[in-house]
Amino acid sequence: MGDQVMVTAAEIARLAKVERAAVSNWRRRHPDFPDPVAGTPANPLYALPEVERWLAARGTPASIAPADRLWQELRVQYEDVRLADGLADVASFLSCPGLGATLKKQSDETFAERIPVVVAQNSKLPGGPPFSHGLRPSQVAFWRRLAHAADENPAELFEELHSRYIDSSSRSTPATPPELAALISTFVHSGDRVLDPACGTGTLLWTLSGKGAKSLTGQEIDPALARIAAFRLRQADILAGDSLRNSKFPYPYDLVVCDPPTGVKEWGHEELGYDARWEFGLPPRAESELAWVQHCYAHVSPGGIVIIVMPIAAASRRSGRRIRSNFLRSGALRQIIALPPRLASSHSLGLHLWVLTRPEEAGIPQAVKMIDASGFDRKQLRDGFPVDAGVAVPVVDLLDDEVDLTPARYVTRPAHSLADDHVAALEELSPLLRRLPRALPGRYERTEVAMSMVPIADLVKTGSILLLLNREAPRSDLRPQPGDILVPALDPSAAPTVLGKALDHPPPDCHLLRCEPAVLDPHFVAGFLRSEANLRQAVTGTGTFRYDVRRAVIPRMPLAEQRRYGAEFRRLAEFADLLHRAAAFGEDVVRLAHDGLTSGLFDLAPDALEGDLT
């Protein structure tokens, strides 16, 4: 494969601003479409220069962002080793500002020889020496381009590359998805001292950094991931090492969060057999997760909280029964939350969150809160975690022969509330259905208007828009105000919205835009941010939706004309909201009716039996 940059069919579609199906058609209908140079028949890879030439010859020049091109080149350079090592080398390089300028006039041979030495001497990141595989003169062009691209904001560029690493199918190590980290953060209210003993690339700590913690601490067994986390979290204390065999941070913390590796057999079962951390019992060899949860608990202070991601099997496996029962008897285990599938990075199964507290006083709690959100979709979770969907299960009911802590066993809808919920859903649905015909949008005149477009990035530079990116939200004290625009960064089905009321904190999964009212109408801006053209142009990453709002464009218009468009976009948004609410309540009516009829709680009305086939 050499040093050529390769792209997938999905990436070609993004570069050409077309749908994925269009690329498939090009491959079938055009004999001169570039042949794959690598990959598999199901996921072929194409040489980027050949694709760019082919598109340019047909009047469809590819538009590739600098971060996208750098990522593709990095993926090529580290094809024989792990991508994590490449990204960690980028972190070490960027942690030494001015290196590119220092060696700018050096030959490629001198640059390749000196950079590994100079970076190793000057980088303070943990995790072992950078460039462990050396640097070839043919690779120097990439590092020169990287230094140039990072001149203005190396941290921002690195986050762009890190997001592509998280999305990459070539990534060989699991990583905490931003969506899971954002969900965990909803359970965190405070914590002066925070520890993540398996911090990976630091995503959990990154998300929690806006919760008012005075210190962030992390440990990671993978040296490359530790370097990445340390660069992303300059204010945190990140060390490399095996937390279970050699914890570098023994003192207690107010909050311990963890998304540990799962299914690890060689976690130290033999050498750690008499470790003091196993106060609830020696974890079985095949249940490393029960070692991690006890490790986290050992590091939390009285009154402190542990929130740990667990596989669903850990709640019911026979081998962990004794440890689960000891957790219950000690009063440590307080909540178990079942999450929807596909929130993990390494599998599509569901997950549980275990929430533990080290009791300040002796005594067994009366109940454990069980919450089953496994059937909720991501939009429902984003709108508000269903804490009321749970039940308090008495500890004595959990201490049976199985000690099964699976929430679905205990969270059922009370029979007496089913009929009331069905009536309430009908009462909500009926007025919505009456309003829908009146809110239906009208027809529009056909025209071809040539619009002069301006990128959001330019409006940010001129001060017409204040932009807070979603990754900056956890550390920002900006309070969203009415008129601000929230643009979902991770969900293509969610539309940009204009706030009608103030919020306490910026949402961690949304970009925030604040328009200068004398220049821009927020409803006008939000409407154009939702356009198909902007969705295609502003999406970055490899295979996962990530809206880079800075790349979106809006037309130049007088403010009066903006307000005309804005008023129409507002009416459309209100109609869409009305339609969504009607559909949601309609689904509730049908689902509750099915539940009542099939459980024997509802009887058919007399007229419902007419026409019955017997």
Image (cartoon, helix red, strand yellow):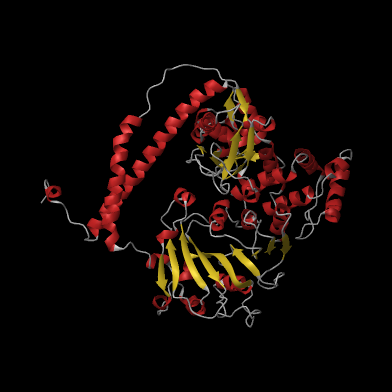
- Taking the spot 39% from the left edge, 76% from the top edge, the residue there is 397
* 359 shown above or below 572: below
Q: Is residue 37 left or right of residue 144?
A: left
Q: Is residue 392 left or right of residue 605?
A: right
Quarter occupied by residue 46: top right
Q: Is residue 412 visible?
A: yes
Measuring from the top left, give residue 352's x and y in whole percent: 49, 63
- Taking the spot 49% from the left edge, 50% from the top edge, the residue there is 382
Question: In the picture, which quadrant includes the N terminus?
Answer: top right
Q: Is residue 607 left or right of residue 456?
A: left
* 518 shown above or below 11: above
* 21 shown above or below 231: above
Q: How many tags in the picture?
A: 0
Measuring from the top left, give residue 113's x and y in whole percent: 86, 48
Measuring from the top left, give residue 98's x and y in whole percent: 84, 44
Q: Is residue 264 visible?
A: no
Q: Is residue 393 left or right of residue 49?
A: left
- Judging depth in this view, the residue of 189 and 121 nearest the camera is 189
Measuring from the top left, give residue 217's x and y in whole percent: 69, 63
- Judging depth in this view, the residue of 396 and 280 nearest the camera is 396
- Taking the spot 45% from the left edge, 59% from the top edge, the residue there is 387
- Taking the spot 53% from the left edge, 60% from the top edge, the residue there is 187
Q: Residue furthest bottom?
A: 274
